[in-house]
Structures are given as C-alpha cells and as structure tokens.
Amino acid sequence: MIEQARNPLAPYAHEGAHAIEVENLAKRYGEVEAVKGVSFTVEHGEVFAFVGPNGAGKTTTIRMLCTLTEPTGGRALIDGYDVSKHPRDVRQRIGLVFQEQTLDQQLTAEENLRFHAVLYGVPKAEVEARIDRALRMVQLSERRSDLVSTFSGGMARRLEIARGMLHTPAVLFLDEPTIGLDPQTRALMWEDVMRLRKEEGVTIFLTTHYMEEAEYADRIAIIDQGRIVAADTSEALKRTIGADTVELSTGDDDLAAKNLEAAGFTIKRGEDEVVAFVENGEAQVASIIAATGTPIRTVKVHRPTLEDVFLHYTGRQIREGQGGASMPPHFMHFARRR
Amino acid sequence: MSVTQAPVTSAHHHHLAATSDLRTIRMVWRRELIRFVRTRTRILTSFVQPILFLFVLGYGMTTLVGTTGGFDFKKFVFPGIVAMTVVSTAIFSAISIVWDREFGFLREMLVAPVSRGALVIGKTLGGASVATVQGTIMLALAPLIGVHLTPLLVIEVIGLEMLMSSALTAFGVFVASRIQRMEGFQVVMQLVLFPMIFLSGALFPLNGIPGWLAVITRINPLTYAVDPLRHVVFAAQDMPAAAAARFATGVTIFNYTMPISLEILIVLAFLVVFLTLAIAGFSKTD
Ligand SMILES: Nc1ncnc2c1ncn2[C@@H]1O[C@H](COP(=O)(O)OP(=O)(O)O)[C@@H](O)[C@H]1O
Ligand SMILES: [Mg+2]
C-alpha cells in the first residue's frame, strides 16, 4: 500500500495531459545554440521519431526532456509535469536509454535490472515478476544470469531497453537505439520497440540519424541545426514534397516527351531520360508506357523517400559530412517481412 | 491535478523517502561487495604492497633499529601496515566511481529518482566494508610476526577500520566527484594518498622526528586514524617499559598527548566533512 503510493506509475497520472508537450524549447551552450526553440506534442501510446544528422540537437533535446540538462528557453511537460519544476516526478515517469551504454559489465543481466528496480522504487513484491517480464520482452530470459561483459552490443542495447521499461514508465526515451548495430539486430530492436508499444502501451520517443528507420514511427520530426524543419507522419511528409516520378529512357526522348505532354502528363526532359510526375507511379506506369509511342528501354518508378524529404527541407543529404554508414537496402526488406 | 494517487500526508512522504533511501543505500553497498568478490585479482594485488612493506620495512628496519625488550620494529610497523591496507583499499574502491563514469554506469545511478546522499552513503559504506575485510585479513597475519590477538583487540581494530575506511572512502568519493578521468584520479592520489600514508606515523614512530616533519604529521588527518589502531594493538601486547617508551603511541601537540577519544573525533569529523563534500560534489554533476 505504502509502496504503491511511493511509486505512482500508472501511465496516465495527469488525465488529459499529453505524453510530451514541448514549447519553444531551447538550449544554448555558451556560443553554441544546440536547440533553437522546438515545439511539438506527442500523444500517449505514440512512437515518435526525432530524425536528424549528427549535431542536430537530438541528444540535447532528450537530455532536456529527461531533466538532465536545464533548458535555456521554453518549456517541456512530460505526462503533465514540467521538467524544470518537477524533475523528480518526471524521472519517475520516464525510462531512458542513453546513446552510450550505461550497464555495469561486472554484474549479470538480472543484477543490473534488480539495481535499477531498487533505484526506481519498484515495490519489492513486484520486482521478480517485472524482471521476468522485461527480460522476456527483449528475449534475454536465457541470459539472465550471465555477466553483461559477455553480451554482444545488440544484446546489451536490448537489455538496456528492458531496464528502461522495468519501472513501467509512461514515456520511454531511446537515444539512437540502433547506432552501431548490425542490420539483423536493428530489426530485432525495432521488433522490441513495437512489442513494447503494443503490449505495454508505452509512449516511445526515439532519435536516429537513419532516415529509413524513421518509417516505423507513427510520426517523425526532422531536426536540423537545432530546428524542427518538418513534423508529420512519414506518408504526409513524403506527400508534401510532391508526387512519384516515372523515369523513362526511350529510343526517341523528344517524341516521347511530346506524346506524354499531349496525353496530359506533367513531364521534365532530362539529359538521357524523360521524367513524368504522377500521383501514384506504380498504378500509372502502364498508361504512361502506352502514351509514349516509342520503344522504351528502361522504366524507373521512384517514390519519394524520407531521404528526399530531408533533402527537400534542408538542401542537404542527411549523411553529408559525417562518417555514419548508410543502412544497407536489404535491411528494409528483412525488417518489413516480419 | 494528480488523479490516480490518494492524497499522501507529508509524514508518509518522509517515511517513504527514508525507506527508499535505505533500500538504495543497501543496493549500492551490495553492488560494491558483489564486484569485490568477483574481482579476485584485485583482492590479491591489494595485499601485495602492504605485505612487501611489512617484510622489507619490517625486517630491514628491525636489523637497523634493533630489538627493545623483545619488541622489534616489525611489531611496531604491523598496525601501520594494517592501516595502510585499509586506506589503499578504501581509496581503490572510491576510484571505481571514475570507472563507473567512464563505463557509463554512473549515469544510470545519477539519473535515477533517488537522493545523491543515498548513492554516496551506499558507495562509502560499500568501499568501507571491502576495506575493513581486507584490513582484517591482514590483521590475521599478526601471529606470523609475533603480535598477539585477543578477541577484544580484534573487535576494537575492526571498529577502527570501519571508521578509518569510511572516512577515506568518503574522501576518495569526493575526489572522484571532481575528477572526470582516470589519469586525473591517479595524479591526485599520487600527490595526496602516498604522502598521507607515509607521513601518518604508519611506518615510523612520531616521537623524536624533526620539527617540520612533526608539524606535517600533526596536520595529516590519517595520523589520528593510525594512532588509535596502533594503541589498541599495543595494549594487548606484553610490552616492557623500555619498548613502550621506544615505540610510544599517542599524538603529542605542544606537550599535550591527545586521548584516543579526541583522535577518533577528528577522524569522525573528517568523515562528516568529506561525506558532505562528496554529496555536494555529486549533486552538481549530471
Ligand atoms: N555540453 C555541451 N557543451 C557544448 N556544446 C554542446 C554540448 N552538448 C552538445 N553540444 C553541441 O550542441 C550541438 C547538438 O549536439 P547533440 O544534441 O549532441 O546532437 P545530436 O545528438 O543530434 O547528434 C552540437 O553542435 C554539439 O557540439
Ligand atoms: Mg546524439
């Protein structure tokens, strides 16, 4: 009874409050304006992705939301609690997985979780069940008694996610959860995240600089140089930057261009190709081919990707000037199949 | 605004905070013990230095200083070596915070909704327990060099070890709170820890030393931790008057010989000061 009062971890402590509510949040480190006034809202049960290149201000934003760094402007509420005024209430309600590992390598998986349970005031009677559940959630039950030093990077990461969920937070923050992981492990991690959302109803706020990954999120905010340049669902974001393109290379591009225009398509004449802009490239490819009236060598249908969205809003490729490896294309297939 | 929890009285709040702090202290303390037991090499290596000192210094100096009434330098230096074991183990335990910082685990602790005081106290008690165990294992070597152990002596020594190790761990935790990297800690410890041990009366008698050295030893807080330890060990020995005079215990300032209770008070004050500073140190960092 007493323990329960100490640990008011029902996900919705403030009825009607958003999971996260941020207004003009800013952080300045001396000369550096790491975050230049961002505003957004995340609802309960949402998976929200903060996407942007290194140095965009993702970690700084997470640190402010988690009460680890005092904002220099604006305000942020977590589950209705102001991060500056009620840091302890906020900390009770959040789970946090840092960009860097924060496990004790010399303890076992279970000991790491037990330590966390005590620090977050999980009632004694519930500790065992929660540890079991958390380990099952990330499929590490078999390894519970192994030292973390024997874990792979991916296993450690997933254990951290389990730990972040141990005190049943309302919001789980994951800072670059997939960084440095191989594609297969990344896919497993995303499975974990989706399972947590489904089974625990937790709100998930995560950052990544892998554009493709952001597809999984319900909503995406693109952050660049401390500003949110666009925020919406991935579909809506792609729609804002325009239509699909169908790229044709033909025996006679001039003729093809003339015929397509005559058929009412919006086109652009490239060096060695003709590009048609259409609402739904895959559905219209047949009528485009029919209208071309000249032999076709190749057809390419391109849907805008989040990469294109980023390029559109920032004028740069997301990976410009940074060492991060891009995600191999087969990952998406692998991950989507599941 | 809060709708899911029943109103909680402030008395309840205090009670709950205290319960959770105690649980945290116990957990942090337990972690120290688990890690201690898991690193057997650390247990062994932490005996190497004191044992080396005991034999090199003990046997080497005994031939120089000679034996007074059946009491030799080995026996004199033995309590000092026990103290040295305790001090270096305590400091080593505190160092692990800098490791925790490097390996990230410190963040896991500092982010948690618990008081920094509970974390620092848990850490200090953990380091102190480990150091007390090490010191007591060292004490068990006493018969090898002809120092008698009585149950009372052992109990008294353990009590003093706990006090001394708590004070030194708190000091180390404070230093660790101010230092970001391992190299920094090592520099501070070389400049502070070793001089502190060497100038504490652990390894030589405090009477009849040059004036400047006497001043330094009296400023050194460790002096007041080593002396009571030696005092209780000597009290259980069968010492002839000549030996007792030659290897006198007690710290004298301006011809005033301090009682043990005052020395213990000084160490206690040292503990309180550095515990407070350590808590403050960790309350600032994030
Ligand atoms: N403690 C700090 N002191 C000074 N500058 C900082 C600090 N933390 C971050 N920055 C700067 O703020 C900017 C945003 O950093 P960060 O939030 O870590 O980006 P991201 O996580 O998106 O890669 C960077 O230019 C970074 O150098
Ligand atoms: Mg970052």
Image (cartoon, rainbow, N blue to C red):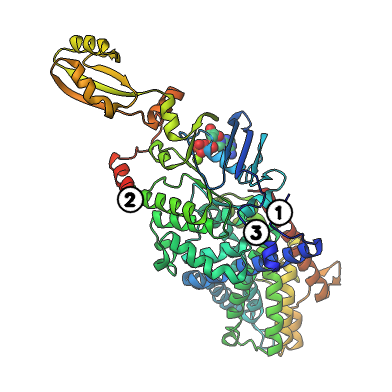
Against A281, residue B175 (above or below) is below
**Residue annotated with mark 3:** B173
Chain letter for mark 2: A
In the picture provided, is A279 more to the left or to the right than B146?
left
Q: Nearer the viewer, mark 3 or mark 1?
A: 1
Q: Secondary structure at mark 2?
A: loop
Q: Amino acid at mark 2?
A: Arg
**Residue annotated with mark 1:** B3
Question: Answer yes or no: do the residues labelled 3 and 1 have beta carbons within 8 Å?
Answer: no
Q: Which x, y percent locates residue A296?
A: 15, 20
In the picture provided, is B60 more to the left or to the right than B80?
left
Give whichever of discs 3 and 1 has the lower sequence position. 1
Q: Residues within 10 Å of mark 1 (few under 14, many from 20)?
A: few
Front residue of B275/A128: it is A128
Q: Secondary structure at mark 3?
A: helix
Tell me which corner region of the image, top left, top right, bottom left or bottom right, holds residue A266.
Answer: top left
**Residue annotated with mark 2:** A338
Ligand 1's image quarter is top right
Chain letter for mark 3: B
Tell me which corner region of the image, top left, top right, bottom left or bottom right, holds residue A252.
Answer: top left
Q: Which x, y percent locates residue A142?
A: 39, 68
Identify which residue is drawn at 48% across, 51% down: A197
User: In this orientation, does residue B197 appear?
Assistant: no
Do discs 3 and 1 belong to a common subunit?
A: yes
Q: Nearer the viewer, mark 1 or mark 2?
A: 1
Q: Nearer the viewer, mark 3 or mark 2?
A: 2
Q: Amino acid at mark 1?
A: Val
Tell me which corner region of the image, top left, top right, bottom left or bottom right, holds residue A211.
Answer: top left
